[in-house]
Image: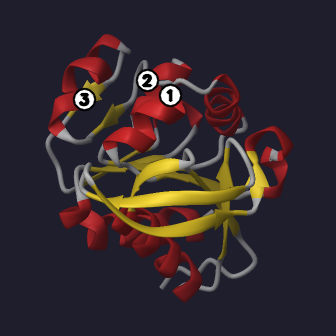
Amino acid sequence: MSTLNGKTIAFLTSQTGVEKAELTDPWAAVEDAGGTPEHLAPEKGEVQSMVGDVDKDETFEATVAVGDADVSRYDALVLPGGTVNADTLRGDEQAVALVKAFVDAGKPVAAICHGPWALVEAGVLPGKTLTSYPSLKTDIRNAGGTWQDHEVFHCPANGWDLITSRTPHDLPAFNAKIIEVVGGK
């Protein structure tokens, strides 16, 4: 069984609109496997979560601003979804640059639902196969990726591991694959 003992996993969100379960469930899985999750956002401070795209839920604390993040401190990156979160994040140049820096460093990236929009924007999908919320299919293909409809998909092509899932319903498989892949590094 893989564990994440001694590993620090970055969770990158915008300040608003992150799908609560797509942040909290992988976070808990990382902690349960012995890892240390850390919340990054464009600014330190409050992050508003949602359930769906209209119902505000809890707030969470981002402890590291994207501009202060050092990729070398982390073993992997998780990109939770939420339409508003993912759309806002892909418009933030520093956040997109951070995503690209994780890929350039060959570190695993896990993205769920609309989370792959940051990967589209970072231009890192040529040669990669992944899944996502179905409405991202054309964006992923236009960015050079191959879209598949799977509960979870792991693609090790191009020297970095990409773990993707479609929706909150896929979280058990998504979380297990994160632990397996990152724990095996």
Kind of residue sitting beneath label 3: Leu
Kind of residue sitting beneath label 2: Val
- The mark that comes first in sequence, 3 or 2, is 2
Image quadrant in which the C terminus is located: bottom right
- The mark that comes first in sequence, 1 or 2, is 1
The answer to whether 53 appears left or right of 14 in the picture is left
Estimate the spatial distance between the alpha carbons at disc 3 and disc 2, rounded to whole Å.
Answer: 9 Å
* Badge number at residue 90: 1
Residue drawn at point x = 38 percent, y = 40 percent: 84
Kind of residue sitting beneath label 1: Arg
Q: Position of residue 72 (x, y in %)?
A: 83, 49
Q: The residue tagged with tag 2: helix, strand or loop?
A: helix
Q: Return the residue at label 2.
A: 120
Estimate the spatial distance between the alpha carbons at disc 1 and disc 3, rounded to whole Å.
Answer: 13 Å
Q: Are marks 3 and 2 in contact (CB under 8 Å)?
A: yes
- The mark that comes first in sequence, 1 or 3, is 1
* Badge number at residue 136: 3
Q: Within 10 Å of the Cα at label 3, are there few (<14), some (14-19), or many (20+) other Cα atoms?
A: some
Residue drawn at point x = 46 percent, y = 42 percent: 156
Q: Position of residue 161 (x, y in %)?
A: 51, 46
